[in-house]
Image (cartoon, grey):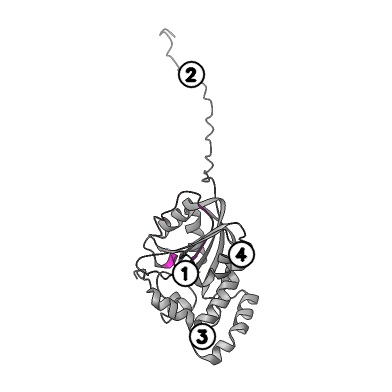
Amino acid sequence: MPEPQPMRLDVTDLRAFYASPLGLVTHRFVSRAIHGFLGSVSGLRVLGIGYVTPYLGSVHCIAERTLAFMPATQGVVNWPGSGRSCTALADPTMMPLPEAAVDRVILVHALEGVESPRELLADVWRVLTPGGRMILVVPNRTGVWARRDATPFGHGQPYSRSQLGRLMRETLFSPEGWAETLYMPPVRSRLWLRTAGAWEALGTGLAMPFAGLHVIDATKQLYRPIAVRHVRRVQSLAPARVLVPAGQPG
């Protein structure tokens, strides 16, 4: 069965989702997971890729510089609401930044929507400083959220944990922390939304496999690992004796 083709929602759909009651609950849990890995960004340069502005509010107040790149197929919004805009349209596989330009990169609504995930992560690797970190939020292949297109996480290509691990190894990232979030079902009923905290506590406590999202904290590897080659030991062979019939010169 062929894999679903990557799809990307319009920025107006994403804004409407995060303004809804379900989107507000989603933001609370996803933001908790992101900032649990991100830590202090004081004096750091932070880049968001995809639709990350809902998660950059507290970052923008502390970081030395904050940028948010949105792909042209999604569209762009002005952010923040006051002061100079920090957002721009950009191809996430060819970002208009020099090498080692940022210290942290946060990707939300990004990896699942691109045609070449390896090219995206390769360019993230390029713009990160040595030892820089990437926070990656991706729909879980086995989760319910990836199966319902009523939310933004139901569009594009979801991933399993093993697929993400392989992709990061191929693009020279070392996963340092893994988390899952959004254990509640993606329904808009206010009654269900009141139980979201209980779902999250239960799923996290029991490490259940049906979470809606993977959240990964990964570090940029500085050197490509080289496979160890096994040296074949060659036995030294003595020259074979040649038997010569009697009467012939030896």
CB under 8 Å between discs 4 and 1 = no
Residue 21, labelled with which disc?
Answer: 3
Q: Residues within 10 Å of mark 1 (few under 14, many from 20)?
A: some
Earlier along the polypeptide chain: callout 4 or callout 1? Answer: 4
Q: Where in the figure is residue 142, as x and y percent of width and height?
A: 49, 74
Determine whether the residue tagged by mark 2 lies in a helix, strand or loop. loop
Q: Residue at x 36, y 62 (%)?
A: 115
* Of marks 2 and 4, the one in the foreground: 4
* Of marks 1 and 2, the one in the foreground: 1
Type of residue at label 2? Arg
Is residue 108 in view from this perspective? Answer: yes
Kindly identify which residue carries mark 4: 37
User: Does residue 14 appear left or right of residue 30 in this picture?
Assistant: left
Earlier along the polypeptide chain: callout 3 or callout 2? Answer: 3
Q: Is residue 249 above or below residue 235?
A: above
Q: CA distance from mark 4 to mark 3?
A: 25 Å
Q: CA distance from mark 4 to mark 1?
A: 23 Å
Earlier along the polypeptide chain: callout 1 or callout 3? Answer: 3
CB under 8 Å between discs 4 and 3 = no
Q: Where in the figure is residue 194, as x and y percent of width and height?
A: 58, 88
Kindly identify which residue carries mark 2: 241
Q: Residue furthest front?
A: 83
User: Which quadrant: the C terminus?
Assistant: top left
Kindly identify which residue carries mark 1: 79
Type of residue at label 3? Pro
Q: Is residue 103 above or below residue 198?
A: above
